[in-house]
Image (cartoon, helix red, strand yellow):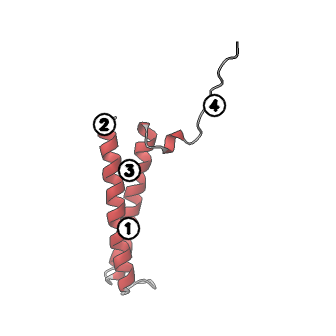
């Protein structure tokens, strides 16, 4: 009698399903790794010219960001291989 209404999920491409979700995981991971590398280099003093230069906090924050980005990238690559 009544037809079932289907409502599209506008956030389905962020769920990690499909190629767009995989690309988001990989892109986010690479961006986080690059930012982490810059922060780490500034923190240990190899990239001078910032208030972050020579501050050990930024070296550790950069390392943590790099590792988190690496994990995101590897998860995205793993999902890509299964797709």
User: First in sequence: mark 3 or mark 4?
Assistant: 4
Please tell me whether mark 2 or mark 3 is closer to you in this view: 2
What quarter of the picture does the C terminus occupy? top left
**Callout 4: few (<14), some (14-19), or many (20+) C-alpha neighbours within 10 Å?**
few
Q: CA distance from mark 4 to mark 2?
A: 27 Å
Furthest-right residue in view? 1
Mark 4, residue position: 7
Quadrant of res 37: bottom left
- Can residue 56 be seen here? The reply is yes
Residue 20 in percent (x, y) is at 45, 40
**Rendered view: 69 above or below 62:** above
The residue lying toward the viewer, choosing from 47 and 39, is 39
User: First in sequence: mark 4 or mark 1?
Assistant: 4
The residue depicted at 43 percent of the width and 36 percent of the height is 18
The residue depicted at 34 percent of the width and 75 percent of the height is 40
User: First in sequence: mark 1 or mark 2?
Assistant: 1
What quarter of the picture does the N terminus occupy? top right
Q: CA distance from mark 4 to mark 1?
A: 37 Å
Mark 2, residue position: 82
Q: CA distance from mark 3 to mark 4?
A: 28 Å
Mark 4 and mark 2 residues within 8 Å of each other at the beta carbon: no
1 sits to left or right of 70: right
Mark 1, residue position: 65
Residue 38 in percent (x, y) is at 37, 72
Mark 3, residue position: 26
User: First in sequence: mark 2 or mark 3?
Assistant: 3
**Rendered view: 78 above or below 35:** above
Q: Tag 3, which secondary structure?
A: helix
Please tell me whether mark 4 or mark 2 is closer to you in this view: 4
Q: Tag 1, which secondary structure?
A: helix
Quadrant of res 11: top right
């Amino acid at each position: 009698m009544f037809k079932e209404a289907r409502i599209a999920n506008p956030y389905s491409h962020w769920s990690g399903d499909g190629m767009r979700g995989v690309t988001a995981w990989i892109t986010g991971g690479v961006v986080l790794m690059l930012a982490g590398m810059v922060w780490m280099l500034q923190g240990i003093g190899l990239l001078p010219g910032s208030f972050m230069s020579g501050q050990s906090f930024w070296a550790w924050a950069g390392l943590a960001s790099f590792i988190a980005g690496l994990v995101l990238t590897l998860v995205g690559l793993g999902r890509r291989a299964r797709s």
